Amino acid sequence: MRMPTYRRGGIVALLIALVAGCGYALGAVGTAGAADEGRAKNVIYLVGDGMGRTHVTAARERYHGAAGKLAMEQLPVVGQVATYAVEKKSGQPGSSGFKPNYVTDSASSATAWSSGVKTYNAALGVDAQGEIVPTLMELAKKAGYRTGNVTTAEVTDATPAGQMAHLLARGCQGPTYSASSCQDTAITGAPLPTDDVRVTPAADQIARNTTVDVILGGGLARFDASDEEALRGNGYTVLGSPAAQKVATEGDLDGAVGERVFGLFNKGNLTIERSKRLHPDSAQAREPSVAEMTAKAISLLDRQSSDGGEGFYLQVEGALIDKRSHANDAAQTLEETKAFDEAVQVAVDFARKDGHTLVLVTADHECAGFNIVEKGTFTNAEAAAPPTNVDSGNTANNSDTLRTGGNVKDPSRSAGPINGAGAGNAKNFAPATFRTPDDPDGVEDGDPDASQWLTYLSGNHTGADVPIFGFGPGAEKVAGSIDNTDLFGIVGKALRVVG
Ligand SMILES: [Zn+2]
């Protein structure tokens, strides 16, 4: 990536020094026994990006009906995770100068579980002061585990990069070095020298630091010929070609072998499942699903550790749940949630057979204030006037600001269910409606008769807690209300890489 060669060695040397000197106990990796109770040989950590509790419920209802369950909902342990971030230069919770930001982004949240610290939005692998913090995947690698990182986003994007890069600003992805996208002088005071890892594009770091053995996802345009050379030099089987900007295909993935595999299937984010389904002859339809990438990553990571005691640590992200939620696109949000749940099923099937694998399924934050509203109703945003007090028996309970006008839908802002007529009108606040398996034949998506009515509050993340589901050794630790930074210790202890 257009950097002098001395920098590349510098990045690797710096990271090795950081991991070696991180201060966390790096325990021996042994076979499970009495002393290892609650400890796992392998951890598969699955993240539905932007997947709040309502995303899970709505996907369940749409695809399995009211009495059905998603794969993730069938896991025995359930908890909820607080996701807040902090402001730049904030202290950590409980310390002086602590300044929370109640709505996180994917970067801050990824740093919370990867490195166990609260940080500011856009920060990756650095704390709220901008100092580098080691990641669980670096610690796992150092302790002899094999590592994998699967995503439907660009592999340089926040959730995957949080395990394998350190950046002051998540926009610093590559391929060209950009001072404006990489520096953050609000944190560092003055611009950092360009050989500082924190201002080195994520693609350069990922191609050279060997933190992750199996890297599968999108983002080919973030990488170039020098990255491909670096990857091959580090022993990776490179599917497709960053140098030729030739994307890898599902077929390349099927045939992939090797200790280290790098495969990017789109120049940008991977393609939504709906588009692949509707255009089966397109080039995009040859991209693997997140479930297929998960199955292949497990087979690559597990097969090669079967002769030794070391297990693996795999992270899987269903990224497009978030990206379609930002767009308030309920149909694709739900289809991507279903695709992610199929990856969960792959992980659980492996874990049941293996018996020593911890599977955790969670999200980094909720996206867009997704809601299931009563059939035939509408949202406050669509109302001509705010809802009236329904507690008419006790007028003392009226709102302080007296509400008048009744709860009437404003037709100028709501033309009906937006899957049907009016879907293209940006002013249309109307709910999206979907048929579910509980509906009679003939009811279609977008019909007012469809039983599922969904709305969004905004186009941005919200501060709602997210669900977590667990299976396997140590899973009981995610029950109850936890914080996203707790996941660093829970996974780290399961892998015996955090004391
Ligand atoms: Zn988002």
Image: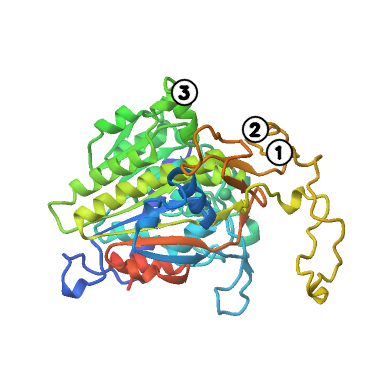
Taking 39 as reference, is 354 above or below it? above
Name the residue beneath numbered marker 1: 416
Per the model, the C-alpha gap separating discs 1 and 3 is 29 Å
Frontmost residue, 76 versus 106: 76
- Residue drawn 61% across the image and 61% down it: 103
Residue drawn at (45%, 43%), measured in percent from left and top? 63
Estimate the x, y position of residue 200 in percent, counting from the top left. Answer: 50, 48
Q: Which residue type does callout 2 highlight? A: Gly
Disc marking residue 420? 2
Name the amino acid type tagged 3: His
Element class at badge 3: loop
Which one is earlier in the sequence, the residue at label 3 or at label 2? 3
Classify 44 as above or below 249: below
Q: Earlier in the sequence, mark 1 or mark 3?
A: 3
Image vertical order of residue 429 relative to residue 254, above or below:
below
Any part of residue 147 in sight: no
Return the mark for residue 279.
Answer: 3
- Indicate the secondary structure of the residue bearing disc 1: loop
Q: Amino acid at mark 1?
A: Gly
Report if residue 401 is visible in the image.
yes
- In the image, 302 versus 64, the foreground residue is 64
Marks 2/1 in contact by CB < 8 Å: the verdict is yes
Residue 227, image x, y percentages: 40, 37
Specify the quadrant of the image occupied by residue 187. Answer: bottom right
